Amino acid sequence: MTDAQQTDSSTTDQHSGSTGCCCGAGHGLSRRRALGLGAAGLTAPVLAACGSSEEAATDTEPTATSGEALGAAADVPVGSGVIYTDAEVVVTQPTEGEYKGFSAVCTHQGCIVSQISADGIVCTCHNSVFDVATGEVVSGPAPSPLGSVEVTVDGDEVTVA
Ligand code: FES
């Protein structure tokens, strides 16, 4: 389980710092500072990297392919889940024995979700939270639910259907 992330930590507010960028990419420029530099013609690459906060992700399909083994079913906690970052799939177990699969690609701007907290599946780029049972948006700027990914449990292995 080298690429999987299983966490119950609380969400992190990446907007708390006044010098962070809107996209959470950590390039250390606030939008105001970037716009100030823009007057000098210095910011086109930075702004292009940020994009608009109003744009929804257009490609939210995970990289996982049908038949791909994700990991052990026993590693998926009841009431929570595991994020398989390489496959871009989240597998949850809302109730014992019921496994759900979702794309890990956030529908807001395409970050990979990175935490599963008591509130749900969390994208820390702009703090969207998705329901572990349905993938529906619980809070945050994401415009639509996480995409559904069919998964099966064969023996003790969770596999993309
Ligand atoms: S990309 Fe913005 S909340 Fe996920």
Image (tube, rainbow, N blue to C red):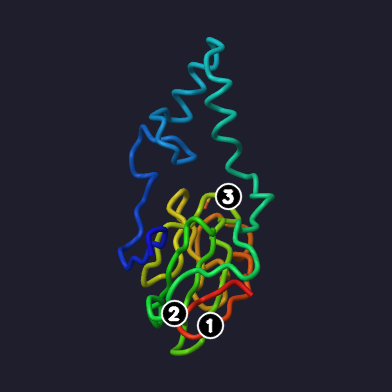
First of labels 1, 3 by sequence position? 3
Indicate the secondary structure of the residue bearing disc 3: loop
The earlier-in-sequence mark between 3 and 2 is 2
Secondary structure type for disc 1: strand
Could you tell me residue 75's position as x and y percent?
Answer: 38, 76
Tag 1: Cα neighbours inside 10 Å, few (<14), some, or many (≥20)? some
Q: CA distance from mark 1 to mark 3?
A: 27 Å
| C-alpha span from label 3 to label 2 | 26 Å
- Residues at discs 1 and 3 in contact (Cβ within 8 Å): no
Q: Is residue 57 left or right of residue 75?
A: right
Residue pushed farthest bottom?
96
Some atom of ligand 1 lies within 8 Å of the CB belonging to the residue at label 1? no
On whether ligand 1 comes within 8 Å of the CB at mark 3, the answer is yes
Disc 3 target residue: 110
Task: Give the mark toward the camera: 1 or 3.
Answer: 1
For the point 49% across and 58% down, which residue is it? Answer: 128
Quarter of the picture holding the C terminus:
bottom right
Given contact means CB atoms under 8 Å apart, are the residues at marks 2 and 1 in contact?
Answer: yes
- Between 153 and 102, the one lying in front of the other is 153
> Circle 2 is placed at which residue position?
73
Decide which of tag 2 and tag 1 comes sooner along the chain: 2
Secondary structure at badge 2 equals: helix
Task: Give left or right: position of 94 versus 12.
Answer: right
Going by the numbered disc 1, the residue's amino acid type is Val
Q: How many numbered marks have been drawn onto this rendered protein structure?
A: 3
Q: Residue at x 53, y 10 (%)?
A: 40
Mark 3 or 2: the one toward you: 2
Q: Amino acid at mark 3?
A: Gly
Position of 158 relative to 51 (above/below): below
**Residue name at image x 44 percent, y 61 percent:** 122
Q: Which mark is residue 153?
A: 1
- Whole-percent x, y for residue 43 in the image: 53, 19
